[in-house]
Image (tube, rainbow, N blue to C red):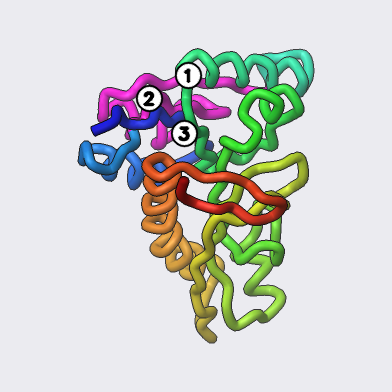
Amino acid sequence: MSSPAPVVVLLSGAGSLCQALIDASADPAYGVRVVAVGADRAGVEGLARAERAGIPTFVCRVRDFPDRAAWDAALTEQVASFQPELVVSAGFLKLVGETFLDRFGGRYLNSHNALLPSFPGIHGPADALAYGVKITGATLFVVDRGVDTGAIIAQAAVPVLDDDTVDSLTERIKSVERPQLVEYVGRLAREGYRLEGRRVLIGP
């Protein structure tokens, strides 16, 4: 069996998506090893989850640098020090810059809580609810230089219920977002993939 693919996870909060990846990677057949978890703020539960699993963590805060470009360069170097094959944004609420994308372009994945291209940005469930759509969901995509505009890897649909609140809809989206992330990060690592225009093709 080939060795598992090293993956760095970036997050900003509770880290439930990250936990799903950590749990899956306990199975050697999954083909992924979470080698580090990074955050843009200290003291978040996502870092604590990684520490409990014995995974190295780091914090890279924007306010510790003179500008966003300096922060982006520092984040790039911290992630690169773990030599990941893939980098996963799992609730990481910062847009990376040119330096990061130059280094990890095509290998930086993000899970978004809406069916892109609808409702990009950090308020996906609230925006879907406000618009009155009947179906929303979760999208896994390859990050590019836009805001939630990259090539789509996978999507899962979630119906919007008449009595939904932002919180209830967010939680139901997470219930499909977690298994989707686990399935496709594993498949990309085990089977390989390539980008052809806006299509992500998995397999040799």
Q: Is 41 contained in the magenta span?
A: yes
Give the residue type that dot 2 points to: Val
Which is nearer the eye, 49 or 36?
Answer: 36
Which is nearer the eye, 3 or 161?
Answer: 3
Per the image, the residue denoted by label 1 is 83
Q: Secondary structure at mark 1?
A: loop
Instruction: Name the disc covering residue 35, or none.
Output: 2
Q: Residues within 10 Å of mark 3 (few under 14, many from 20)?
A: many
| Distance Cα–Cα, label 3 vs label 1 | 12 Å
Residue 190 horizontal/vertical position (percent)? 37, 42
Per the image, the residue denoted by label 3 is 9
Label 3 or label 1, whichever comes before in sequence order: 3
Give the residue type that dot 1 points to: Gln
Residue drawn where x is 21% and y is 37% of the image:
28
Residue 52 horizontal/vertical position (percent)? 26, 28
Give the residue type that dot 3 points to: Val
Residue stretch in magenta = 33-62
Evaluate if marks 2 and 1 touch, with contact meaning CB atoms under 8 Å apart.
Answer: yes
